[in-house]
Amino acid sequence: MNILRLAFIFITYLSVMSPAIAAKPVLTIYTYDSFTSDWGPGPAVETEFEKICECDLQFLGLDSSIGILGRIQLEGKNTKADIVLGLDTNLVHIAKETGYFAELPSTIKDIHVKNSSLPIEYSDKIFMPFDWGWFGFVFNKNILKNPPKSFQELSNMPNDIKVVIQDPRTSTPGLGLLLWVKSVYGDKATDYWRELQPKILTVTKGWSEAYALFLDGEADMVLSYTTSPAYHLIAEENDHYDATVFAEGNYLQIEVAGMLKSSSEPELAAQFLEFMASPEFQNIIPTTNWMYPAYNAEIPEGFEALAKPSKTLLFDSEIVATNQKNWIDEWLTASTK
Amino acid sequence: MAYRKHKIKGTEKQGAEFFNITQSLVLLKHFKLSRLYGLFFGLILSLLGCAILAQLFRMANNDDYFGIIFSSSTFYIIKSAGWQAFLSTFFSLIVGIMCARALHRRGNPWLVKIVLSTSFLALVVPTTVAALGIVAVWGRSGFMSSMGLTGISLFGLWMVILAHVFFNAPLVLRVAYSALKSQPNYYWKIASHNNLTEIEIFKVIEWPTFKSLLVPLASLIFLLCFTSFSIVLMLGGGPNVTTFEVSIYHAVRFSFDMQLAASLSIIQILICSVLILVSKPLNFSLTSPALNSRNTIIRNDMESLFSKLTDFFCFVIFVILILIPLVALFYRLDLSSGLNLFAQDRFWNALYTSTKLAFFSSIFSTIIAIILIHSRFRLTQLGSRFSIHFIDFSVSFYLLMPAIVFATGCFILLRNYINFFEHAFWLVLSANVLFSLPFILRILSPALEKTLLQHEKLSLQLGITGLRKFIILTSPAINRELQLVLGISFAFSLGDLSVITLFGNKDFETLPYYLYQLFSRYGASEADMLGIFILGYIFITYFIFGLILMSFERFQSFSQLVINNATNK
């Protein structure tokens, strides 16, 4: 009997140790890890929002962007999250199909149409954009003298030029590249992936791993955004980095946030979404998340020097939802043989 | 004479039977509880396992079930994991056996000591730390390329194989070496009298020694590599190299494809059960080779130039594959930026979580193991074979089930009642306990059963029972095993990177999970520092457990006194 009693004491002791409930209302936001890192937008957004909300804003940084959605699906209705921040328009339809997301309140429905500074017209009933950028391959101008100007040139490069990409199953840039290739090559996408295969150094789970690998000099190019060189230009005063602009066009990413039906703080969540469109939030974005702001905001000096694609590519999110599985399987077979 | 002998035997038998019967009566009366505890835990374990399996079947049960099993991606996983496991097994066996031969042939006690303790270290290093070491040696900016030798192109198949060889070659080495050592000395004398050449020695003595070991060893290693998770996750580098466990993780964590996850889990469980049934990989003891046998063996193939060269070559391979990855972290560590680690809150949080986890995991799993062995012992006395098999089954169940599958199954099973993301600690803890149980039982049960048998009559005579008996009589006698078991389960849980990958986040992370996150940043010296820290931590706690158990020694002297008194009567 003693052993059981001992175990019982341990268990009560442990349950007492669990975190206490905070007095202020808590708004929990699930996002990807680089958003919440010290150099990301997270800390500044938290301070700014807590100034106006009388609440405790808590970010939960997950290790990849698509992982956020998976996590919501795993947790189901019991999720702690009030808001999910960091999906992109490609995933919007898949996310809606889960049925966990609530419609935007009518008060903020129009904001993102009215003040939008997106390169295309975009509006959605459930998800609200907060920043955007074009995908592009980032390289060091001093090392890579002749950057490719099209997908064909990319695959024609010598095999000792190495590229790091992200896994389309786990990260939105990876999925973006998959869709980019698909929108350019259509049914011949598999052939293209086969051609590109020898140049791919490795496929990482998330953006930060890939970028770190590139900065460590392990690879010559990395799949990132056309806005990434701005980081080196502004934060590091280093103008050696540039991003590719392809003749076929560059694929667009619009990052979005949405609130959950199961949220216990729906008003607070709505307030945050509204705050996302405010200059306070939007001014933080360019120099921390290194993306273009989604609403009228000051674009800092340095961004004008960035390469601008002539053509913007974007799939409808319903098409992505119906084909995602097949297209990923295509990519898997092409890159595993 | 023969008749007499028979008669004596007969009475002995009768006496024994009589004793057994009376004992059984006593047992029935007094030890009902200790039997029930074991059955109770066995019941819980197997119920949980079966519920998870049933859940999996339910989730996988749709029209497309066969479609998933026979899809090209499933075949690809089998092909990729099988090929990788085959190569890993092959190289581990070759390296391990060659080194064991070389070691046995040289027989220098210092060399033996160094090689064997290095290989022991390699066996207990957490996978996450080992992966870091492998990259420090073989990565593009690693030790090998700094020596002017080309490193292996970053991540992929060969990295994974190198890591698997790092873990498994030492195992082969230790088993093969103790097998060679256990051959009678006159074998070698006869060999040198007849002037057998190296090849003949191999044919006549060594090969027959290894032959019986090969199949169980190979299938054990194959199983370990086939189901490998954290190594493949960290070093696999994309979809090219995969295992079922990694694919299940992907299906659960990212595409939320529970049907796929369930089908893949069932396939993996099936493949592993077939492998285990066919080859019985666990049928050999992992006891450490006798270090203290003094009689040096003179092998007549010692002096030839060829054998000297090959032995030297083997030791070089051993150093490169096993020793250098162990020390590479120290070599590469950039102390000034590595020390940044200790300024991170995340590190201290992870340390706290990991310590809590490892502490409770080692305590719980040891306690459960002791209870299980106790009641197994009582049940053996009663001869209730079914219950014994039941307990064995309930534990070995968890050898087959992948940790990721366990966590997913638990999660789906209970997700309407408990949000495991908030209580992830409990899930990780129970996974650690359950998955270290089979190993703990293997180590603990021979010693504990022997002690129980020895103290049986004595404790009945003196009326010392229950917890008091355990503290006064039993635990001092199995002091060393307890230390080993506590240390091993502590280390296991401190290095475990499986369930946490599903539930971890910045607010809940363990040391290996944090290491995995740092590892993703590449070349972070904090990662090296953390690797070294985890290693040091494991060894220190091992010694602390030893110290705590040492204080039990005073009980031992007391119990010695009791035993002496009892026998003098």
Image (spheres, grey):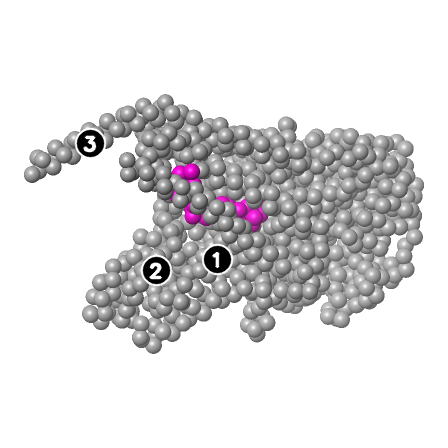
Q: Are marks 3 and 2 on the same chain?
A: yes
Residue type at tag 2 = Asn
Q: Residue at x 54, y 53 (%)?
A: B540
Give the Cα separation between the discs numbered 3 and 2: 39 Å
Q: Earlier in the sequence, mark 2 or mark 1?
A: 1
Q: Identify the mark at residue B358; answer none if there is no mark.
A: none
Query: Circle 1 marks a residue in which chain?
Result: B
Give the Cα separation between the discs numbered 2 and 1: 19 Å
Please name the residue that numbered disc 3 is placed on: B13
Answer yes or no: do the residues labelled 1 and 3 have beta carbons within 8 Å?
Answer: no
Q: Earlier in the sequence, mark 1 or mark 3?
A: 3
Q: Residue at x 67, y 40 (%)?
A: A70
Give the Cα separation between the discs numbered 1 and 3: 48 Å
Mark 1, secondary structure of its residue: helix
In the rendered image, residue B436, in percent from the top left (x then y), is placed at: 49, 43
Q: Which residues are magenta?
A: B472-499
Q: Is residue B99 above or below residue B288?
A: below
**Residue B415 shown in magenta:** no
Q: Residues within 10 Å of mark 1 (few under 14, many from 20)?
A: some
Please name the residue that numbered disc 2 is placed on: B292
Q: Residues within 10 Å of mark 2 (few under 14, many from 20)?
A: few
Residue type at tag 3 = Lys
Mark 2, secondary structure of its residue: loop
Horizontal side, residue B145 vs residue B301: left or right: right
In the rendered image, residue B174, in percent from the top left (x then y), is placed at: 39, 57
Mark 3, secondary structure of its residue: helix
Q: Is residue A77 above or below residue A277?
A: above
Locate residue A30: give its quadrant. top right
Horizontal side, residue A141 vs residue B516: left or right: right
In the rendered image, residue B416, in percent from the top left (x then y), is placed at: 64, 28
Residue type at tag 1 = Leu
Please name the residue that numbered disc 1 is placed on: B121
